[in-house]
Image (cartoon, rainbow, N blue to C red):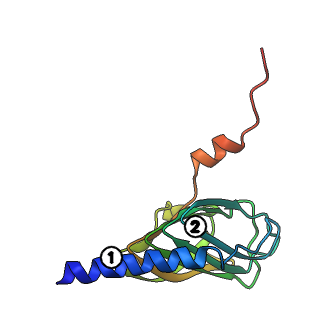
């Protein structure tokens, strides 16, 4: 009975995602102080260079990706970023010194901060991460070797 209800819920969610894919769009440029990124049935990797990042929202619905904030500066008043991972995943890459507070709800999913806590600044602005993870998740890290390799300058030819 429970398995049947879960299966119906998953199918309804997939249909909903397919319908919404054409209706919801990401709206933000790398330099924008507020972001609105959407990944439905696709990967999406974005990097912010905001000079006063205030937050925004990220939706991964049967999709996923990375939001790289290492090139951004937090607004002095802090920021709030709302993450929703529904059968998807979000990797949030932040500078190692940023203070991050998690206030998320997980249903067969969750969010976590995997950074070295000894490097986090004691004072300064805070990034408040709110959101929901349903059969999905979000992870906060400070290193992303795959992104660094993709953006590294090519070695000079010999």
Give the quadrant of residue 29.
bottom right
What residue is disc 2 on?
120
Q: CA distance from mark 2 to mark 1?
A: 29 Å
Query: Is residue 95 placed above or below 51 in the rendered structure?
Result: above
Lateral position of residue 10 relative to residue 127, left or right: left
- Number of numbered discs on residues: 2
Query: Is residue 125 placed above or below 95 in the rendered structure?
Result: below
Camera-nearest residue between 11 and 104:
11
Camera-nearest residue between 107 and 69:
107
Residue at point 74%, 85% (across, down): 77
Label 2: element kind: loop
Lateral position of residue 7 relative to residue 40, left or right: left
Lateral position of residue 125 relative to residue 63, left or right: right
- Nearest to the eye among marks 2 and 1: give it: 1
Q: Earlier in the sequence, mark 2 or mark 1?
A: 1
Residue at point 43%, 79% (across, down): 13
Q: x and y percent of residue 135 in the render?
A: 38, 73
Q: x and y percent of residue 54 in the render?
A: 73, 80
Q: Residue furthest left?
A: 1
Q: x and y percent of residue 53 in the render?
A: 75, 75
What residue is disc 1 on?
108
């Amino acid at each position: 009975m429970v398995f049947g209800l879960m299966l119906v819920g998953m199918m309804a969610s997939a249909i909903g995602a397919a319908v919404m894919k054409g209706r919801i769009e990401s709206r933000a440029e790398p330099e924008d102080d507020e972001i609105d990124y959407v990944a439905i049935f696709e990967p999406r990797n974005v990097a912010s260079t905001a000079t006063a990042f205030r937050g925004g929202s990220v939706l991964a619905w049967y999709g996923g990706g990375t939001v790289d904030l290492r090139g951004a500066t937090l607004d002095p008043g802090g920021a709030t970023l709302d993450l929703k991972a529904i059968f998807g995943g979000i990797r949030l890459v932040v500078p190692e010194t940023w203070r991050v507070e998690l206030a998320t709800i997980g249903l067969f999913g969750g969010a976590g901060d995997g950074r070295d806590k000894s490097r986090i600044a004691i004072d300064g602005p805070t990034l408040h991460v709110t959101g929901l993870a349903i059969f999905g998740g979000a992870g906060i890290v400070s290193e992303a070797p795959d992104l660094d390799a993709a953006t590294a300058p090519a070695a000079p030819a010999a």
